[in-house]
Image (tube, grey):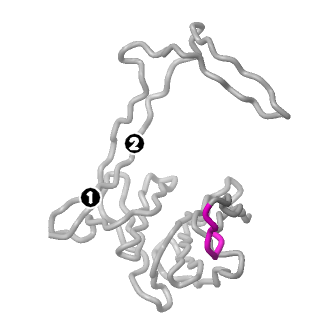
Amino acid sequence: MKPSVALLAAALTACNAPDSRWTGTIRDSAGVSIVENGNEALWRSGEQWRVEPFLTIGTSGDDVNYQFGRIVSVAVDEQGNVFALDFQAGQVRVFDSAGKFVRAIGRKGRGPGEISAPVWMYLGTDGSVIVADRGNTRISRFLADGTPEGSYPMRIDQRGFPIRWESLRDGGAVAQWRRFGRRVVGEPPPVEPVVA
């Protein structure tokens, strides 16, 4: 039996308006709001935030399309389709809003349209899927139907290599870089730059 990981989409049940019993303070420090909470809990029993699953995708059964190794990125498009980037499988799996498998994008490997060690995924406004692949040191683009559309090199130089990616509202992305080299015991770690 192959290992599987359940893909869980969850909704947070929001809390109500601020409670007048709050005893904390808010102060300004050079334009940054600093919030300090009081010592007393404000939630009454049953008022806490809850995570409520509304879709679970994954199985330990025989269908490999529903088996996951290590999911490193998840995205949902405007139609409610779920895109799961699996590091171990080296592919993106697409499921409809009901959790039914639709298609796989990419496959494990080092050739065109293949993915080696994916770390991040982004859904383009045109339906394309962008995958940052540290193993192949490239960013690959796939059309909405999964067809490979090309790639460009991921810069890895004396600054180090990108370890974390985040999507921006304007369609861009930022990356956090890990520097190469050894840390000296007792010295603070080097600053890890964020590159837009």
**Residue placed most toward the observer, 64 or 154:** 154
- The verdict on residue 61 being magenta is no
The CA span between labels 2 and 1 is: 15 Å
The three-letter code of the residue at mark 2 reads: Ala
Q: Residue furthest right?
A: 30
181 relative position to 63: left or right? right
Circles 2 and 1: CB atoms closer than 8 Å: no
59 relative position to 16: left or right? left
Residue 24 vertical position relative to residue 55 in the rendered view, above or below: above
Badge 1 local density, few (<14 within 10 Å), some, or many (20+)? some
**Residue placed most toward the observer, 122 or 118:** 118
Residue 22 vertical position relative to residue 15 in the rendered view, above or below: above
Give me the residue at 21% from left, 59% from top. Answer: 59
Give me the residue at 53% from left, 72% from top. Answer: 131
Magenta stretch: dominant SS? loop
Report the span colored magenta: 178-185
- Secondary-structure class at tag 2: strand
Residue 124, percent from left and from top: 60, 65
Q: Which residue is mark 1?
A: 58
Quarter of the rendering containing residue 181: bottom right
Q: Quadrant of the C terminus?
A: bottom right
- Comes first in the chain, label 2 or label 1: 2
The answer to whether one can see residue 173 in this image is no
- Res 47 label: none
- The verdict on residue 184 being magenta is yes
Q: Which residue is mark 2?
A: 10
The three-letter code of the residue at mark 1 reads: Gly
Give me the residue at 65% from left, 65% from top. Answer: 175
Residue 168, percent from left and from top: 67, 56
Residue 159, percent from left and from top: 71, 75
90 relative position to 34: left or right? left
Quarter of the rendering containing residue 162: bottom right
